[in-house]
Image (spheres, rainbow, N blue to C red):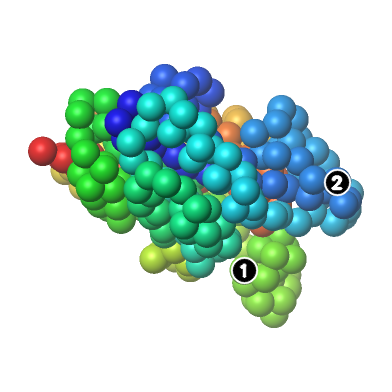
Amino acid sequence: MPVAVITDSTAYLPSGWAAKYGISVVPVQVVVAGQPYDETEDQQAERVVEALEQWHPVTTSRPSPERFFECFRAAQEAGATSIVVATLSAAMSATYESALLAAKECTIPVHVIDSRSIAMGLGFAVISGAEAAGLGANEFDVTSIIERRAEASQVFFYVDTLEYLRRGGRVSSTRAVVGQALKVKPLLQLVDGNVQQVDKVRTASKALARLADLAVESAGDAEVDIAVQHLSASERAQQLVDILQERLPAATIVQCPVGGVVGAHVGPGMVAVVVAPKVDWL
C-alpha cells in the first residue's frame, strides 16, 4: 500500500465499499441533544431523523486533527509511504482544515484535497483514486484523479422543506418561510462547494422527475456512474433509480442513504442524485 487513500464519512460510500477499495474513513460527528455520535455508528441517521421531527437540537462537528492523525499513523504503520486524503467541501465544513493540521504532523507526504463536493460526488472520486493507487499510481496521479473526478461530478438534491437548511444557516429565513407558504419543493445543486437553488416544483413526483431530467442532462453522452441517495426516503429513491435505469441504461447506478451530518441540514425526505463522469488517470 504505497499510497493510502482516506476520506471522511460524508462520502457515504455504500456498505462494504470502503473495505473493498481499501479506503480509510474518518468520521464526522453529529450531535443530537448534546450527545455526540460518530457518523460511522449504526442508527445515527435514524436518531437524527427522530430528533429533527421532534424539534430537538441537532448540530454537526468536524473531526479533530487528532482523529485524522490517528488514521494517518495507522496507514503509515500498515506500509503506506504517502497519503492522499479528500474531504467534503471546505465551504460547508472545517473538516478540510482538520486534515491540513494533521498532515503537518505526519512524517510521510500527505496530500489534502478540498473536493468541493459531498456524498458520492466525493465518494466516486476517492474510489477512482483508490483504484488507481491499487494499480500502482503514485501520490500525484492519485491526487489528480480525485480532484478531476470530484470537479467533474454534479450533485443535485431535493428537500421536502427549506426549514432544516434554514436552521443550519444554508438559506435565509425569509426564503424558507416563503417556500413553506407556497408549498414549494426546492431543487438544489452543489456549485463550487456551495448550495444553490436551481429550480422549484410543487409536488414530490415533479421533484423526482426534474431530478431525473437534471441527471440525464448532466450525463450527456459521457460514461458515468450515478448514485441516488436519500434520508428516510427509500421508496422515492427507488422510484428515481427506476426512472434513471430506463433513461440511462448504460450508466452504473447505485442507491445508498446519507448519514446524520447531511441529514441534520436537509431533513428527512431528501433525495439526491450524483452524476460522476469517469476520468482516465493514465
| Image quarter of residue 115 | bottom left
User: Would residue 211 appear left or right of 142 to someone viewing this image?
Assistant: right
**How would you rate the neighbour count of disc 2 (Cα within 10 Å): few for under 14, some for 14-19, many for 20 or more?**
few
Q: Is residue 29 left or right of residue 108?
A: right
Name the spot of residue 2 as percent of width and height, x first.
30, 31
Q: Tell me, yes or no, if residue 16 can be seen here.
A: yes
Residue located at (44% from left, 39% from top): 6
Q: Indicate the quadrant containing the N terminus: top left, top right, bottom left or bottom right.
A: top left
For label 1, the crowd category at 10 Å Cα-Cα, with few meaning under 14, some 14 to 19 and many 20 or more, is some
Looking at the rendering, in which quadrant would you find the C terminus?
top left
User: Which amino acid is tagged 2?
Assistant: Gln
Query: Residue 161 appears at what percent x and percent y?
Result: 68, 58
Foreground disc of the pair 1, 2: 2
Q: Is residue 218 visible?
A: no
Q: Amino acid at mark 1?
A: Arg
Q: Which residue is mark 2?
A: 35
According to the picture, the residue beneath numbered tag 1 turns out to be 170
Q: CA distance from mark 1 to mark 2?
A: 23 Å
Residue at figure coordinates x 55%, y 45% from the top left? 69
Extreme-front residue of the structure: 107
Determine the secondary structure under disc 1.
Answer: loop
| Residue 151 coordinates in the image, percent (x, y) | 30, 55
